Amino acid sequence: MSSGTGDTQTSGSGDITRTLDLLWDTGPRPSRGPKPGLTLDRIVEAAVEVADREGIGALSMRRIATELGTGTMSLYRYVPGKAELLDLMLDRVQRPSEDPADLGDGDWRTALEALGRATLALYRRHPWLLRVNQSRPILGPAALDGMEKVLSRIKPMGLSDPELLSAMLLIDGYVVGAARTQLYQEEAERSSGLTDAQFWEAQRPALEKAMNSGRYPVMAGLSEDTFGPDFDHFEFGLQRILDGLEVFIARRATG
């Protein structure tokens, strides 16, 4: 799976009204194209498949047409262009599961914990999402369904509505950072041809010399497993964020 090296794409950069019509199925239906079975749903599905395999930089109307075995102009019967198609892709991949258990069976903490893990898994399945500026998203049914699902679970936190939204943004921002770090590590391994172990082994002689110099006593005294692969940094950070929210809620409750 490739993450792609193309420039960052931006959501909401197309015809907003037309995109909303397509997302909510409120616009005119396209005339039947020359290729039997070609639908907007299939076009979006093919676009996601291409982005998953080749990265967002490979996405173009011509590339999607090739994937579907049709002419490029056929696609324009269904979607105005690449910008609108990107917004449809974003809504597609973020469809929430129909299973309520996906957010756990417990309280708001369980729900946010599950949200964090599910969001990380989403970026792992579709790493091209990290190449998309979603600061101004077009809100389609999948996006709103997802927000409704989470908000209904965390409403009992007792926070104000802006604070509830901020709690969701806090989780998302943390996950994006962690997912991007993982993506960069994988890209570095592919581009250099060195595994992570080989990369650090190449630095070992110089680092041992630095640690034995006495210049870095704290670092020299760290345990051998400090930089090992067994510690789950993502889970540690996620739990500390949730701990912080618990402290805040408790402090709010006591005035």
Image (cartoon, rainbow, N blue to C red):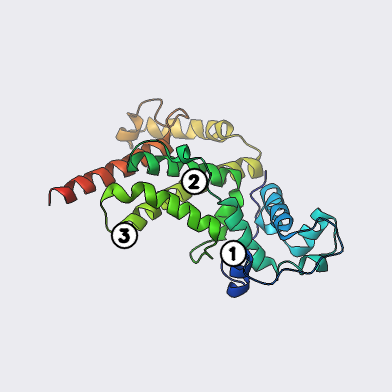
Q: From the image, state whether disc 1 or disc 2 is nearer to you.
A: 1
The residue positioned 12% from the left and 52% from the top of the image is: 255
The residue labelled by disc 3 is 161
Residue 188 lies, in percent from the top left, at 59, 44
Mark 2 residue element: helix
| Precedes in sequence: disc 1 or disc 3 | 1
Q: Nearer the viewer, residue 215 or 196?
A: 196
Give amino acid for label 2: Thr
| Precedes in sequence: disc 1 or disc 2 | 1
Mark 1 residue element: helix
Give amino acid for label 3: Asp
Mark 3 residue element: helix
Give amino acid for label 1: Trp
Rendered position, 155 above or below 26: above
Give the residue at the far top of this rendering: 224
- How many dots with numbers? 3
Residue 50 lies, in percent from the top left, at 72, 52
| Precedes in sequence: disc 3 or disc 2 | 2
The residue labelled by disc 2 is 119
Rendered position, 123 above or below 163: above
Give the crowd class for mark 3: few <14, some 14-19, many >=20 residues within 10 Å: few
Q: Are marks 1 and 2 in contact (CB under 8 Å)?
A: no
* Residue 222 can be seen, yes or no: yes
The residue positioned 65% from the left and 42% from the top of the image is: 190
The residue labelled by disc 1 is 24
